[in-house]
Image: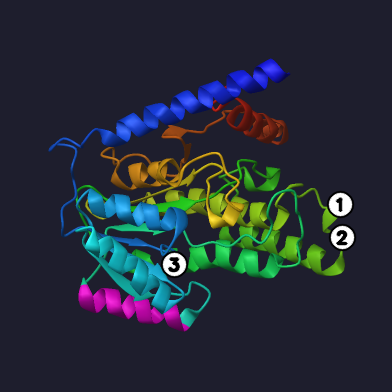
Amino acid sequence: MGGNKERARERREQRLQEISLLRTIPYSDHQRWWSKETIAVVTGSNRGIGFEIARQLAAHGLTVVLTSRDECVGQEATRVLREGGLDVAFHQLDVLDPSSIQLFVDWIRQTYEGIHVLVNNAGVNFNVGSDNSVESAHMVVATNYYGTKNMIKAMIPLMRPSAAGARIVNRIEDLNLRRKLGDLDTLTEELIDRTVATFLQQVDDGTWTSGGWPQTFTDYSVSKLAVNAYTRLMAKILSDRPEGEKIYVNCYCPGWVKTAMTGWAGNISVEDGADTGVWLALLPDQAVTGKFFAERREICLAVRRDDRALASIILWWAHEKLGISVKG
């Protein structure tokens, strides 16, 4: 067992080295569908992975809108990036507050008329290490799931038409899929909301431990499972848009990154953690949508419908232990 863990660690380190190298290779002219006029919004980008995503996107030549709940903190983060010669603007945004979202929408419309890229990075997690309290479950779900969903709905009307298509990138951290959220043919927004509501109800009445929910970082995992399902649902809905008005939506896992959210206990640098989100936002291949990525690779598992429960376990194991994509 120890040998397997060591080999898995070596494979992960090798992959991260490859990603670091890829990040140094500039995009060629025919790959660059964006310019300084390309507007990218990154939520929760005053620190950590969000800050690094904003920095990397701006370094690639996009105009980035950095957002933060705390205006002073956001202004300071923006100042740091601007001093580095990057084109970054700031606007206060609280994804929990409908009025804040509306003010942001109005400002974007007035300032830029629209956007091309939305990276939903804003999120909270109150469990660190081996802790698994659900005391803050309502706040976690409201921020991570409903906040992301509300931002997507608010920004879609502002997505600018283009041949390359607009991009939405959602950040998640959990790879397991609950069986009833695994079938895209029957998946609906109401079903996702009902699943989340069931979890919160079980938290309130103290029965969540027997509900079959993820056993680690439970509230955080449930919120991100919901984001994963909503990402796939939106990709299906948005696929009907005509050419020139396409919106491609995907999600990614940054890994266990050394940030305040992990108590600085992660094993991946913030630069590597942000990389896949930036890569997805700039992906030249416009046809990619409704997918889930980690370390610049799609995490996918083809299974029979009645094997989804087993598949979710295999999928988690393959990624966490081997760092590979599995198809069957």
- Is residue 105 inside the magenta stretch? yes
Front residue (pair 287, 295)? 295
For the image, the number of numbered tags is 3
Query: What amino acid type is highlighted by mark number 3?
Result: Met
**Which residue, given by chain and number where applicable, does mark 3 sit on?**
151
Under circle 1, the secondary element is helix
State the mark number for residue 207.
2
Give the mark nearer the N terminus: 3 vs 2. Answer: 3
Cβ–Cβ below 8 Å for labels 3 and 1?
Answer: no
Question: Regarding mark 3 in the picture, which secondary structure is present there?
Answer: helix
Kind of residue indicated by mark 1? Ser
Segment tinted magenta in the rendering = 99-111
Indicate the position of residue 7 as horizontal and vertical percent values: 59, 18
Is 66 placed above or below 238 here? below
Name which residue type carries label 2: Thr
Residue drawn at point x = 81 percent, y = 63 percent: 202
Q: Quadrant of residue 185?
A: top right
